[in-house]
Image: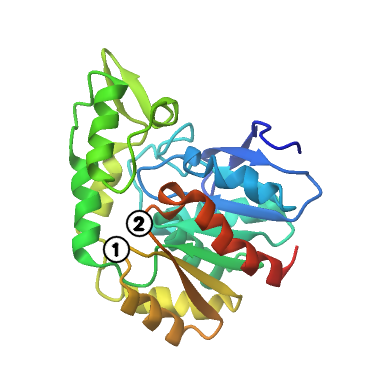
Amino acid sequence: MRAGAPPRTSTFVGGDGNRLVADVWGAASAPPLLLLHGGGQTRRAWSRAGPRLAARGWRVVAPDLRGHGASDWSADGAYGLDLFAGDVRALVAALHDRPVLVGASLGGLASLLAAGEAPRAAVRALVLVDVAHRPDPRGARRIVEFMRGHPDGFASVEEAAAVVTAHLARRPRPYDTGGLRDNLRRRGERWVWHWDPRMLDHFEGRMDPPGMAERLLGAARGADVPVLLVRGGESDVVREETAAQFCARVPRARYVDVAGAGHMVAGDRGEHFVDAVVPFLAEIGG
């Protein structure tokens, strides 16, 4: 695949027959690598990392999770973590050749459960992007508050860009708002986020329910594959001591910090994110 080539669009079937739309880069014969975005994002979160990883010999598949982007919304408004994990299992089965799972936030939690709890998805390795067994409640609350904000949308894409810039203070405001437009859709005269707002009923107050930390640690051990935790060096969601604790309790896990990045590591420091992941991918092989 030539550098800079646009992705192909492909459609997959999720765990309960729901449609999942994905961007795909790389040769069909290359080993698969599955990129799973965080809550409130879309597959466009990987628009820079995807082609760079494909250029290193991977077939990269980046789907919109259920309720996000162009993928189906849950008909009954249900967005429990087990449903997302079921979708990951279905994606892994469709890709066949033991993919590497790279999951950010929500995508990482779903990856852990899919790979480490029965029925275990057959994967080669896990890359967890600023997600571990327990979030810092202050950082988690900040994300939910942002997602709760502006329920009536925005008058323009530029207004949305100003709100995102205030939320992601470490990033400069983009001159081109085309990427942000991919995360919005029109509702009448307004622009609203391109995800189902009913998800927030599941996210809010359920960031760290009783027993979840031990469940996630058990899943990470049960997956029995190499695990790389890529932490944003300035993350307020995964503290350094939490990352260290995770790796101490998961035998095949290690972590690396990406300096200058917050919770959205791949968006904050895209090139540094890829640089952090590539040596791990080279170790596990294609």
In this view, 244 is above or below 267:
below
Give the camera-side residue of 148 and 72: 148
Provide residue 42's location: percent of width, then percent of height.
44, 39
Rendered-image quadrant of the C terminus:
bottom right
Q: Quadrant of residue 151?
A: top left
Image x and y of residue 213, in percent: 33, 75
Binning the other alpha carbons within 10 Å of mark 2 as few (below 14), some (14 to 19) or many (20 upward) gives: many
**Closer to the camera, 167 or 101?**
167
Q: Which residue is the site of mark 2?
A: 263
Q: Is residue 207 above or below residue 243?
A: above
Distance between mark 2 and mark 1 Cα atoms: 6 Å
Q: What residue does disc 1 label?
A: 237
Say which element carries label 2. loop
Question: Does residue 123 appear in this view?
Answer: no
Question: Mark 1 and mark 2 in contact (Cβ < 8 Å)?
Answer: yes
- Please report the residue visible at 48 percent of the width from the left and 64 percent of the height from the top: 128
Q: Which mark is residue 16?
A: none
Residue 228: horizontal and vertical position, in percent?
A: 53, 71
The amino acid beneath tag 2 is: His
Asked if one can make out residue 39 in the rendered structure from this viewpoint, the answer is yes
From the image, which quarter does the N terminus lie in? Answer: top right
Q: Earlier in the sequence, mark 2 or mark 1?
A: 1
Residue at 32 percent of width and 62 percent of height:
234
Disc 1 crowd rating (10 Å Cα; few below 14, some 14-19, many 20+) is: many
Which secondary structure lies at badge 1? loop
**Measuring 39% from the left and 81% from the top, which residue is drawn there?**
244
